[in-house]
Image (cartoon, helix red, strand yellow):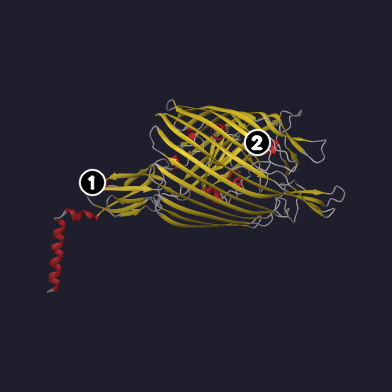
């Protein structure tokens, strides 16, 4: 009896389903493959979902998927992936009868090539009148980079002189003529070679943007050879909580790198903390030599938080702390001036806040950035006996600096194809440098008060116009005016002098696009650099000896001329970028030896110099290597720079410029 009832129920259910299409249609299976539209390769882990239902699946390693859907005329599936633009597809009977092929437009082509540093708003590399590079967070982590110089060292145009605390040199000019920023906020160095970048936590970065060529119109004093902008992730966005751990090891100097990142994100609020600890042994050079006391131990922590009031209003706060204990790598204090007992210490605290209002109309955005930086570091100068060769005295300088500043700017949509960026920025920098003197020969110790509250303040106003005349031609032009005051500060001689300087800079460039993938650019710019308090007044200890300032120094100017040719070919598998530059430096602030003063080795003077050279980078992508989901990228970079000091009779080369450098890469 039970069997008869069960058979009757099953038979009745089959009749009901057959006569009720709403039920029967749920057993239809849709299958297909998701491809990248530009590269024609399968996309793994793409999300496939039925709109307005909880039904969903993902593609496998070959881009294939299967999903059950209803046979309704308005059944819609949504295909999405973090690196591609989302796509909605209406399914009909004709699509059900075949193996569906879906092509997604990649975001990566647009997003990876977008920079904000060139014009203070997002724009693609192809629209820039000067060369640019982007370094992703993944590249920083994969290469186990320690600081800014490690990050940029393989980028054509940069020179790395030493292993740690190395001056950052771009196109033959150090970071006195290269602005380094965190989220658009300038970092100022107290080393004679400018800001070295060892106290910036680069693992907190979303990406690093490099703009080569004159950038004084927007960024002011020092942007002669270019800028480096380390950009953080926005703290809000998708709802998620995450913990990331990373460990690294290097065999050359037994370098251990440990990192942890904690992240809490909501749509309107978020906070992340990034901590790094690094410890190394002594560096071993290529010939097997061990650099005594070159080991390093440093700690970094970065906190990034913010609140998004609406789509138009947001505020972001960053705080970074660094403490480092390091020795003397070969070359940092001269090739023969290592000291194997004394350690160097440094500490830095940097914080900045950014507010943005984006109505997205005639006024595209109004922006306010404020920042403050406080730090100290020890600097040692060793003196050896000319008779015995033993250490005779040691000068220990305690550099303490603090500075703050900000920028207020507005981006205006004058017309559909015309944007104007205008604003004002400025900063105040102060430096103390008391010195302890140890005389080992006479077994005495003393102090030199040095300078207190020495420094400079600068304020500038700028306007920059970017106009797309047509799809093929883009024009960029701008002008800036700066006023600076340099303060000697209080010294043991009770003298306190001030000097005022002003400068005008400008820029004009164009981009001509032969087609969507081929672009030619030309740029002519006049950049400048104000003399600093160390160069005008202060007596400082450097790696080359004692330097005394020259109060008669004038601002240095540079006429920069850049030409570039970049693009892609062979279905975007081949990408290339060629750039040539020629710089004339007027009033170049250069070192000048002092012969008649035994207590001073160098001073400064205005001279003339010129630099010329170029960079080339190219990459080619091979698809379907060993497996459909594998890609092989081969990259090649090369740079040439030649610079001479025109004040020297024999046209002596400028410091830190190997004539040719090349790099290769396989990914």
Any part of residue 656 in sight: no
- Please report contact status of discs 2 and 1: CB closer than 8 Å, yes or no: no
| SS type, badge 1 | loop
User: What label does residue 486 carry, if any?
Assistant: 2
Quadrant where the N terminus sits is bottom left
Q: Is residue 499 above or below residue 301?
A: above
User: What label does residue 348 carry, if any?
Assistant: none
Residue 431 placement (x, y as % from top left): 66, 44
Q: Tell which of 661 and 497 is nearer to you.
A: 497
User: Real-space Cα distance between discs 2 and 1?
Assistant: 71 Å
Seen in the image, is 625 located left or right of residue 399?
left
Which residue is depicted at the point 41% across and 33% down? 363
Q: Earlier in the sequence, mark 2 or mark 1?
A: 1
| SS type, badge 2 | strand
User: What label does residue 74 carry, if any?
Assistant: 1
Residue 332 placement (x, y as % from top left): 71, 47
């Amino acid at each position: 009896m039970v069997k008869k009832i069960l058979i009757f129920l099953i038979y009745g259910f089959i009749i009901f389903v057959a006569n009720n299409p709403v039920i029967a249609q749920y057993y239809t299976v849709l299958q297909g493959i998701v491809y990248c539209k530009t590269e024609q390769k399968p996309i793994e882990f793409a999300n496939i979902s039925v709109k307005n239902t909880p039904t969903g699946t993902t593609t496998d390693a070959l881009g294939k998927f299967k999903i059950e859907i209803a046979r309704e005329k308005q059944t819609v599936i949504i295909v999405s992936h973090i690196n591609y633009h989302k796509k909605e597809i209406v399914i009909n009977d004709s699509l059900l009868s075949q193996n569906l092929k879906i092509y997604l437009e990649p975001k990566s082509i647009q997003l990876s090539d977008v920079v904000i540093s060139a014009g203070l708003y997002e724009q693609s590399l192809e629209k820039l009148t000067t060369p640019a590079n982007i370094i992703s967070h993944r590249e920083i982590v994969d290469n186990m980079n320690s600081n800014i110089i490690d990050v940029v060292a393989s980028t054509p145009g940069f020179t790395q002189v030493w292993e740690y605390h190395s001056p950052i040199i771009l196109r033959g000019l150090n970071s006195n003529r290269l602005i380094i920023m965190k989220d658009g906020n300038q970092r100022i160095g107290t080393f004679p070679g400018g800001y070295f970048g060892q106290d910036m936590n680069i693992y907190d970065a979303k990406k690093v943007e490099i703009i080569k060529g004159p950038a004084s119109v927007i960024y002011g004093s020092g942007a002669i050879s270019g800028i480096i902008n380390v950009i953080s992730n926005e703290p809000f966005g998708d709802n998620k909580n995450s913990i990331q751990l990373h460990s690294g090891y290097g065999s050359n100097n037994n370098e251990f790198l440990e990192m942890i990142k904690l992240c809490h994100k909501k749509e309107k609020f978020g906070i992340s903390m990034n901590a790094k600890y690094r410890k190394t042994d002594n560096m071993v050079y290529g010939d097997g030599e061990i650099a005594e006391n070159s080991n390093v131990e440093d700690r970094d922590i970065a906190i990034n938080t913010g609140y998004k009031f609406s789509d138009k209003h947001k505020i972001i706060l960053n705080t970074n702390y660094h403490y480092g204990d390091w020795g003397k790598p070969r070359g940092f204090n001269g090739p023969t001036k290592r000291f194997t007992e004394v350690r160097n210490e440094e500490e830095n605290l940097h914080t900045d806040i950014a507010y943005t209002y984006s109505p997205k109309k005639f006024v595209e955005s109004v922006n306010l950035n404020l920042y403050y930086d406080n730090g100290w570091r020890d600097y040692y100068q060793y003196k050896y006996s000319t008779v015995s060769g033993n250490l005779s005295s040691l000068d220990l300088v305690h550099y303490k600096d603090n500075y703050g500043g900000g920028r207020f700017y507005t981006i205006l949509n004058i017309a559909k194809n015309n944007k104007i960026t205008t604003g004002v920025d400025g900063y105040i920098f102060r430096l103390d440098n008391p010195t302890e003197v140890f005389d080992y020969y006479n077994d005495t110790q003393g102090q030199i008060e040095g300078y207190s509250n020495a420094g400079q303040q600068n304020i500038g106003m700028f306007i920059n116009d970017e106009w797309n005349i047509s799809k093929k031609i883009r024009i960029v032009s701008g002008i800036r005016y700066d006023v600076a005051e340099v303060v000697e500060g209080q010294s043991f001689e009770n003298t306190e002098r001030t000097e005022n300087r002003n400068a005008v800079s400008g820029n004009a460039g164009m981009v001509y696009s032969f087609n969507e993938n081929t672009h030619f650019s030309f740029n002519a710019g006049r950049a400048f650099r104000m003399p600093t308090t160390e160069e005008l007044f202060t007596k400082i200890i450097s790696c080359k000896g004692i330097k005394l300032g020259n109060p008669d120094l004038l601002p240095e100017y540079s006429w920069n001329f850049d030409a570039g040719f970049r693009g892609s070919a062979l279905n975007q598998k081949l990408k290339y970028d060629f750039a040539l530059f020629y710089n004339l430096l007027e009033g170049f602030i250069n070192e000048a030896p002092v012969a008649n003063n035994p207590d001073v080795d160098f001073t400064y003077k205005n001279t003339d110099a010129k630099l010329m050279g170029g960079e080339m980078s190219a990459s080619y992508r091979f698809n379907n290597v060993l497996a459909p989901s594998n890609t092989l990228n081969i990259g090649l970079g090369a740079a040439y720079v030649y610079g001479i000091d025109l004040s020297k009779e024999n046209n002596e080369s400028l410091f830190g410029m190997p004539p040719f450098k090349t790099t290769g890469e396989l990914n």
